[in-house]
Amino acid sequence: MHGKTSKIKSKKIGILKNLPSKFEATRYHSLIIDKKTLSEEIEITAETENGIIMGIEHKEFNVHGVQFHPESIKTTIGIKILKNFINYKK
Protein backbone atom coordinates (compact mmCIF):
# COMPACT_ATOMS: atom_id res chain seq x y z
CA MET A 1 0.00 0.00 0.00
CA HIS A 2 2.99 2.35 -0.01
CA GLY A 3 1.84 5.64 -1.52
CA LYS A 4 -1.49 4.23 -2.70
CA THR A 5 -4.88 5.79 -2.12
CA SER A 6 -7.94 4.09 -0.68
CA LYS A 7 -11.58 5.13 -0.75
CA ILE A 8 -12.63 5.84 2.82
CA LYS A 9 -16.15 5.77 4.28
CA SER A 10 -16.52 7.98 7.35
CA LYS A 11 -19.17 8.00 10.09
CA LYS A 12 -18.71 11.80 10.19
CA ILE A 13 -17.96 11.85 13.92
CA GLY A 14 -15.00 13.01 16.00
CA ILE A 15 -12.26 14.61 13.91
CA LEU A 16 -14.16 13.58 10.76
CA LYS A 17 -17.31 15.50 11.73
CA ASN A 18 -18.71 17.96 9.16
CA LEU A 19 -16.62 16.41 6.39
CA PRO A 20 -17.72 14.31 3.40
CA SER A 21 -18.77 10.75 4.23
CA LYS A 22 -16.56 9.44 1.40
CA PHE A 23 -13.07 10.59 0.44
CA GLU A 24 -9.71 9.36 -0.87
CA ALA A 25 -6.81 8.96 1.56
CA THR A 26 -3.18 8.01 1.11
CA ARG A 27 -1.72 4.97 2.85
CA TYR A 28 1.98 4.25 3.20
CA HIS A 29 1.74 0.84 4.85
CA SER A 30 -0.23 -2.38 4.89
CA LEU A 31 -0.83 -2.44 8.66
CA ILE A 32 -4.42 -3.01 9.73
CA ILE A 33 -6.39 -3.26 12.97
CA ASP A 34 -8.19 -6.53 13.65
CA LYS A 35 -11.77 -5.65 14.64
CA LYS A 36 -11.84 -8.61 17.04
CA THR A 37 -9.09 -7.02 19.14
CA LEU A 38 -10.80 -3.65 19.67
CA SER A 39 -11.85 -2.73 23.18
CA GLU A 40 -15.49 -1.73 23.76
CA GLU A 41 -14.20 1.77 24.58
CA ILE A 42 -13.03 2.26 20.99
CA GLU A 43 -15.40 3.34 18.22
CA ILE A 44 -14.61 2.87 14.55
CA THR A 45 -14.96 6.21 12.77
CA ALA A 46 -13.83 5.28 9.25
CA GLU A 47 -13.21 2.22 7.08
CA THR A 48 -12.14 1.42 3.54
CA GLU A 49 -14.80 0.22 1.13
CA ASN A 50 -13.84 -3.38 1.97
CA GLY A 51 -14.06 -2.88 5.75
CA ILE A 52 -10.46 -2.19 6.79
CA ILE A 53 -10.43 0.17 9.79
CA MET A 54 -9.03 3.58 8.90
CA GLY A 55 -10.20 5.71 11.85
CA ILE A 56 -10.95 5.21 15.54
CA GLU A 57 -11.76 7.27 18.61
CA HIS A 58 -12.01 6.52 22.31
CA LYS A 59 -15.58 6.83 23.59
CA GLU A 60 -14.58 8.53 26.86
CA PHE A 61 -11.21 10.21 26.32
CA ASN A 62 -10.25 12.76 23.68
CA VAL A 63 -8.12 10.27 21.71
CA HIS A 64 -8.39 9.84 17.94
CA GLY A 65 -6.42 7.94 15.36
CA VAL A 66 -6.34 7.44 11.62
CA GLN A 67 -4.58 4.71 9.69
CA PHE A 68 -3.82 6.94 6.69
CA HIS A 69 -1.86 10.13 6.11
CA PRO A 70 -4.03 13.28 6.22
CA GLU A 71 -0.94 15.41 5.50
CA SER A 72 -0.42 13.73 2.13
CA ILE A 73 -1.24 15.74 -0.99
CA LYS A 74 -3.25 12.76 -2.26
CA THR A 75 -5.60 12.77 0.76
CA THR A 76 -8.41 14.85 -0.70
CA ILE A 77 -9.64 16.42 2.57
CA GLY A 78 -6.43 16.12 4.57
CA ILE A 79 -6.11 19.79 5.51
CA LYS A 80 -9.71 19.81 6.77
CA ILE A 81 -9.05 16.70 8.89
CA LEU A 82 -5.96 18.32 10.42
CA LYS A 83 -7.92 21.52 11.16
CA ASN A 84 -10.67 19.46 12.80
CA PHE A 85 -8.03 17.69 14.91
CA ILE A 86 -6.48 20.97 16.07
CA ASN A 87 -9.87 22.52 16.90
CA TYR A 88 -11.62 19.41 18.25
CA LYS A 89 -13.49 19.63 21.55
CA LYS A 90 -15.41 16.65 22.88
Image (tube, grey):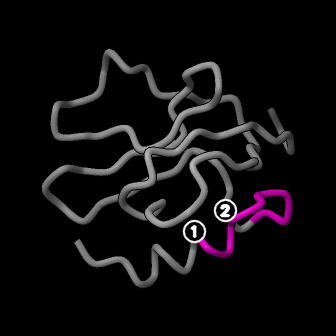
Is residue 52 placed above or below 90 in the rendered structure? above
Which mark, residue 70? 2
Across and down, in percent, residue 72 comes to 78, 63
Q: Residue furthest top?
A: 36
Q: Are marks 2 and 1 in contact (CB under 8 Å)?
A: yes
Q: Quadrant of residue 45?
A: top left
Q: Secondary structure of the magenta portion, mostly?
A: loop
Dot placed on the residue nearer the N-terminal end, 2 or 1: 2
Residue plotted at (57% across, 48% down): 21
Residue plotted at (56% across, 25% down): 52
Q: Nearer the viewer, mark 2 or mark 1?
A: 1
Q: Which residues are magenta?
A: 72-80
For numbered disc 1, what is the local secondary structure? helix
Across and down, in percent, residue 67 comes to 57, 44
User: Is 56 left, or right, of 70 in this rendering?
Assistant: left
Across and down, in percent, residue 12 comes to 45, 53
Is residue 9 placed above or below 19 in the rendered structure? above
- Label 1 sits on residue: 81
Across and down, in percent, residue 73 comes to 84, 66
The three-letter amino acid code for the residue at tag 1 is Ile
Check disc 2: other Cα within 10 Å, few if <14, some if 14-19, many if 20+. Answer: many
The three-letter amino acid code for the residue at tag 2 is Pro
